[in-house]
Image (cartoon, helix red, strand yellow):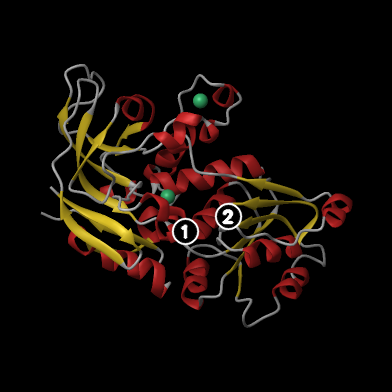
Amino acid sequence: MKVAMYYSLDDIRMEDMPKPKIGPDEILVEMEACGVCGSDLMDWYLRSRVPLVLGHEPAGVIVEAGKNVKDFKVGDRVFAHHHVADLKCYYCKKGDYTLCAQFRQTHLEPGGFAEFFKVAAPNLQIDTLKLPDGVSFEEATLIEPVGCCIRAQNKGGIRKGDNVAIVGAGPSGIIHAMLARIAGATHIMVTDIVDYRLKMAERLGADLTINPNKENLVERIRESTEGRGVDVVIVTAPNVKAVEDGVQIVRRGGKLLLFAPTQPDQYARLSPHSLFFSEISVIPSYSVSHVETRTALHLISSGRIKAKELITHRFPLSRTADAFQTAARTKECLKVVVLNQK
Ligand SMILES: [Zn+2]
Ligand SMILES: [Zn+2]
C-alpha cells in the first residue's frame, strides 16, 4: 500500500509498505479522509521519531475485521482515535485520561496518511465510532480536533454571559469560537496575525477580530470589556508570545486555557505576584479522550458544529507533501484534509 512517510516538514515521501496484518481482535480500515493537525507541523515534536507516518484525524471504511470482533463489521464507516487510555490506572480513575501511561503508547498502524491503517484492540474497544449516514468522511476528520477543544473548554468552564478571547485563529481557534458560542459566551474575540484567518473567524461567528501586528491588542480588549479584560482566554497558538499576550488580556479572577505547547526549551515571563493578586488560573489541556470524541461526533452530526465550513483545502494522498506545505507555510487556510481518492 502507499503511505506518506514523514522525514521532515519539507521532506514527505510517498513510499510502499505492506498492508498491516490484523489479529482476531483488530480491524483494518481503508482511509477515506484524514486531517492535517497543527501538531503534525511541529517539527521539533516529531524529530526524534522520524521517519514515521502521521495522521491522527482519520475516517474510513472497515475492510477486514478479526474473528473476535463483535460490534463492528466490514463496510462500517468509522472514525478511529489513535490514543486511548487503559481506564484503570490512577490517572484514569481521576478522569485524567490523556495522562494515562497507555495513552501515548497507543497508535494507529501505520497512521492516517496511508491507504489502509490497522486499529488495535484497545483503540477499537474504547474509541472507534461508527459514523451516522449524515456525517461525511471529511466532516469526521474534525471529530478529534473538535474533541480536543471540548476537553479544554470543559476544564476551563466557560459560563453563560462570559466574554472569551481566543489567541490564534487556526482551525482550533475557530472551533473554540464555535464551542464558546454553544456554551453561552456573549462576546467572542479572536486574534491572529493572518488577516485571512481573521476574516474566516468573523464569518464563522467571532464578534471582534484583532490583528496584534496592526493594532494594540491589550488596548482593544480593554476597550471592549469596560477596562477589565476577558473572563476566559484560550491560547491556541504554539508560541511564548501568545501565552504572554494571553496573560495581558485576561481579567482579574479570569482563566487562561493553555491549548498548545511551546518548544520544550522555551519559557514565558509570568509574574507569580500578579497571578496571585489577580487570581488568574492557568489551565492546560492536552489532547482528547474517548469521552469528548463522542460529544464531538454528536455536535458535528447535529450540525451545531459546522465541520464542513472549517475545511478549506483538500489534497489526494499522493500530494500529502503539498497538504503539509499549505497548512504550514501559507496560513491562508483552515483545515487541510488529505483524501484517499481511488
Ligand atoms: Zn490533532
Ligand atoms: Zn490509565
- Above or below, 224 relative to 55: below
- Dot 1 amino acid type: Trp
Q: Determine whether, in the image, residue 42 is placed left or right of residue 56.
A: right
Question: How many angstroms separate mark 1 from mark 2 (CA)?
Answer: 9 Å
- Above or below, 30 relative to 273: above
Q: Determine whether, in the image, residue 62 is placed left or right of residue 103.
A: left
- Above or below, 281 relative to 298: below
Residue holding disc 2: 264
Q: Determine whether, in the image, residue 149 is placed left or right of residue 9.
A: right
Q: Earlier in the sequence, mark 1 or mark 2?
A: 1
Asked which secondary structure carries label 2, the reply is loop
Q: Determine whether, in the image, residue 275 is placed left or right of residue 150.
A: right
Q: Position of residue 271 (x, y in %)?
A: 81, 58
Q: Quadrant of the C terminus?
A: bottom left
Q: Residues within 10 Å of mark 2 (few under 14, many from 20)?
A: few
Q: Position of residue 54 (x, y in %)?
A: 32, 51
Residue beneath the point at 39% across and 75% down: 330
The label on residue 44 is 1
Nearest the viewer among 7 and 243 is: 7
Q: Position of residue 328 (x, y in %)?
A: 40, 68
Asked which secondary structure carries label 1, the reply is helix
Q: Residues within 10 Å of mark 1 (few under 14, many from 20)?
A: few
Tell which residue pokes out farthest to the front in this image. 48
- Dot 2 amino acid type: Pro
The label on residue 93 is none
Residue beneath the point at 62% across and 55% down: 234
Is disc 1 in contact with disc 2, using a CB cutoff of under 8 Å?
yes
Tell which residue pokes out farthest to the left in this image. 342
Residue beneath the point at 86% across and 50% down: 276
Asked whether residue 332 appears in the rendered view, the answer is no
